[in-house]
């Protein structure tokens, strides 16, 4: 079986692939100080609950936007699974796609992994939106080349900044406004309208500008936790694909073992 680790700024998502299917997935807060031993205690218990032995893990691949986390995950893999891990974008797990940007080395691993997986699943030019700590917009052309994109503050970051820098505004959960009106009648509704519909307006505007610049029809594929929320209340996305980054890791690992 293949174990993958998608290390984001907020969470590390582990997923266990049995062939091309995800058998299990687990999430833990990102902490670069967490040791390989600590990961092992937590992950071994979860594997046991699934009836999976450590010796069944034959491959391990890491995709990380937090470089400091890679060492401890390497210790986890080598010490507890007896497997030398692959690191996405390095060595045998080199991307294998064109990064047509000014500074290819600065492109986040998650964004390239999304591009790899999306090109494998969807035809033509693509605009990928990933709702993470930041919200990223990426352009992938019909050949699979990564052409660049946009980095915007994540919706949680925007809300934290709003609440943290005002004395009287309450902390609210991110959800669709309870009213169809964009003129709120109370403070909480006004905040929901500003955060939700303000974010929708930003996305619609950026998608329109990207499509205009691409100059060809482009499908919009969304991933990340909040993609489903926005998909329920707008018509922006052609597809929502929650496991895009994990599948990109699986594709890279498959190329190595082929």
Image (cartoon, rainbow, N blue to C red):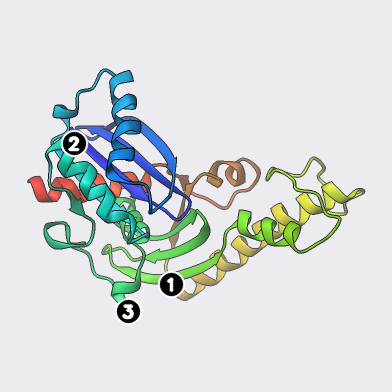
Whichever of callouts 2 and 1 sits on the residue coming sooner in the sequence is 2
Q: Is residue 33 above or below residue 79?
A: below
In the rendered view, does 66 fall on the left or right side of 40? right
**Residue at screen point 23% across, 35% down:** 20
In the rendered image, residue 186, in percent from the top left (x then y), is placed at 91, 48
Mark 3 is surrounded, within 10 Å at the Cα level, by few (under 14), some (14 to 19) or many (20 or more) other residues, namely few
Let me know if residue 180 appears in the view: yes
Task: Quadrant for residue 179, please give it.
Answer: top right
Q: Is residue 48 above or below residue 143?
A: above
Tag 1's secondary structure?
helix
**Residue at screen point 52% across, 44% down:** 225
Whichever of callouts 3 and 2 sits on the residue coming sooner in the sequence is 2
Tell me how far mark 2 sits from mark 1, CA to CA: 47 Å
Q: Contact (CB < 8 A) between labels 2 and 1?
A: no
Label 2 sits on residue: 80
In the rendered image, residue 67, in percent from the top left (x then y), is placed at 32, 61
Res. 103 mark: 3
Tag 3's secondary structure?
loop
Front residue of this view, candidates 166 and 3: 166
Tell me how far mark 3 sits from mark 1, CA to CA: 20 Å
Q: Is residue 183 above or below residue 50?
A: below
């Amino acid at each position: 079986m293949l174990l993958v680790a998608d290390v984001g700024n907020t969470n590390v998502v582990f997923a266990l692939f049995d062939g091309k299917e995800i058998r299990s997935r687990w999430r833990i807060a990102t902490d670069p100080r967490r040791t390989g031993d600590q990961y092992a205690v937590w992950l071994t218990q979860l594997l046991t609950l699934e009836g999976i032995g450590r010796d069944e893990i034959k491959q391990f691949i890491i995709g990380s936007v937090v470089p400091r986390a890679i060492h401890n995950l390497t210790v986890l893999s080598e010490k507890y699974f007896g497997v030398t891990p692959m690191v996405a974008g390095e060595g045998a797990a080199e991307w294998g796609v064109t990064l047509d940007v000014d500074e290819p080395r600065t492109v986040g691993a998650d964004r390239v992994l999304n591009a790899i997986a999306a090109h494998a699943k969807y035809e033509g030019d693509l605009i990928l939106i990933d709702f993470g700590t930041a919200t990223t917009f990426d352009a992938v052309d019909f050949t699979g080349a990564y052409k660049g994109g946009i980095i915007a503050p994540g919706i949680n970051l925007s809300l934290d900044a709003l609440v943290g820098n005002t004395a009287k505004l309450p902390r609210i959960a991110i959800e669709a406004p309870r009213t169809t009106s964009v003129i709120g009648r109370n403070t909480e509704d006004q905040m929901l309208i500003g955060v939700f519909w303000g974010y929708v307006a930003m996305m619609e505007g950026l998608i329109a500008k990207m499509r205009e610049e691409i100059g060809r029809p482009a499908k919009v594929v969304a991933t990340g936790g909040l993609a489903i929320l926005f998909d329920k209340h707008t018509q922006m996305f052609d597809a929502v694909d929650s496991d895009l980054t994990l599948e990109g890791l699986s594709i890279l690992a498959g190329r190595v073992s082929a």
